[in-house]
Structures are given as structure tokens and as C-alpha cells.
Amino acid sequence: MASIFERAFEYVTAGTTIGLGSGRTASEFIRLLGARVRAGFAIKGVPTSQASAALAEREGIPLVSLEAGIPLALTIDGADEVDPQLNLIKGYGRALVREKVVAASSDKLIIVVGPEKEVPQLGARRKLPVEVVPFALPLCMRRLRDLGCQPILYEHDGQFAPTDNGNAILDCVIPPLGHPADLETKIHAIPGVIDTGLFLGMADVVLVGDDKFQLLRERVRPS
């Protein structure tokens, strides 16, 4: 049985530039890609976080800026939720803005997840990350509460923990979302909000693997 990462690698064409996702699953793919690069496979990467950049450099993967790489052939990344239409919630690892920018700069978005990330409706895990400008935190928190979200400022060891962009993450407690696009529009209308973890209509393929990263199924976005 093929691994989920080997199947993801089949989408990669030598000589192209691809987006490198963030998080545990994406990091496993970066390690596989690094082994292929060291064996002679030519590829360049655009990382979605400082952590992914550091890992890719350790693995010997050449990195370029988004400006130098755009348009990217594809991005391979993980997700925190995947619904039946391949809409996503991402950002539990706090890299959602760069992940969305890199994904939007790519011709194809390939998502690799475990089966526990498949949900009948976005919001099943009750959390939606929202990245905001630190100065706007009081306003953003108030407006998010007005929308029925319960924002919780992400901290590390009791201290403000900025994203790679120097911003704040509000982990919003939400119910399952019947109309995620409506909530996305309302959150984006709040001054100071940079982006949300809702990735709607962006994923082209979702590869689902078991706890040993063996491929269970491949889902393609409905036409």
C-alpha cells in the first residue's frame, strides 16, 4: 500500500516550484521530498512558515521567494477540517495567512490529512482561527462576539505569541457552520482582521491516510 506522501509526490513535476505546507503532516511530506532532492530530483519550494522553511533547508530543498516562484505548480499542505465539498478549516498551527497566500498562488492545492479531519460540516471541531492586527484586538474580539463567535487570544506560556507575520491569532469557538461563506464575509468586514482559517473552494485533491500514513482514499473536488 502506497503512503499518503508517495501519492502526493506523484503530483509533483521535476523542475517546478511548489508550495510547502506547515504542520505535522506537511512536515512529513517535506522530509520525503528532501530525500528525493538529495537523490537528484530537481525542485524548488516556497515555504508557508518559518518552521517549514527551516525544515526544508535542513532537508536540502532549494527555497525561493513567492515573488520568484509565482505561479506555483501546486502546494501540498495539511488541514484541520475537510467537509464533503473539500472546503477546509486550517490554521491550528497559526500559519493560516501564509498558507492561504501560497495556496492561492498555486495552480493546484493538494491536501493530506488523517480520517479524523473529515467532518460532515465545517466547525465540527468548534474552532476557527482568525489572524488580526494586534492594535485591533479589542475591536475584533467585540465584533466576533457579536457574530456569535467566542474569541480566545492564542498565547504561549501565558504570553502573547505573534505569528510569523507579527500578528495575533484569535481562536474562535464556533458551532458547526451551515453557511461558512456568509461567516467568512462578515468576519472579513471587521477592521483589523487579516484573514480566517476558512479555505473555501480552494482544495483540488484531498488524500486521506491512516495513522501510519498509508493512503486510504483520494477525493477530488466536485465539479
Image: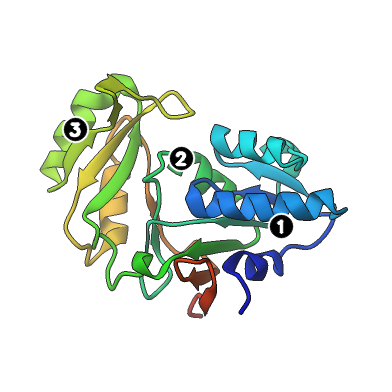
Q: Secondary structure at mark 1?
A: loop
Q: CA distance from mark 3 to mark 1?
A: 37 Å
- The residue closer to the viewer here, 29 or 194, is 29
Q: Which residue is mark 1?
A: 73
Q: Nearer the viewer, mark 1 or mark 2?
A: 2
Q: Quadrant of the N terminus?
A: bottom right
Q: Residue at x 55, y 68 (%)?
A: 204
Q: Position of residue 34 (x, y in %)?
A: 73, 49
Q: Nearer the viewer, mark 2 or mark 3?
A: 2
Q: Which residue is mark 3?
A: 141
Q: Are there few (<14), some (14-19), or many (20+) residues within 10 Å of tag 2?
A: many
Residue 104 appears in the rendering? no
Q: Position of residue 140 (x, y in %)?
A: 23, 32
Q: Which residue is mark 2?
A: 95
Residue 136 appears in the rendering? yes
Q: Secondary structure at mark 3?
A: helix
Please tell me whether residue 79 is drawn above or below residue 151 in the rendered image: below
Query: On the picture, is 97 further left or further right than 170?
Result: right
Q: Secondary structure at mark 2?
A: loop
Q: Position of residue 24 (x, y in %)?
A: 49, 50
Please tell me whether residue 5 is drawn above or below residue 34 in the rendered image: below
Q: Residue at x 20, y 35 (%)?
A: 152
| Quadrant position of residue 141 | top left
Q: CA distance from mark 1 to mark 2?
A: 20 Å
Amino acid on which the number 1 mark rests in the picture: Ala
Q: Are there few (<14), some (14-19), or many (20+) residues within 10 Å of tag 1?
A: some
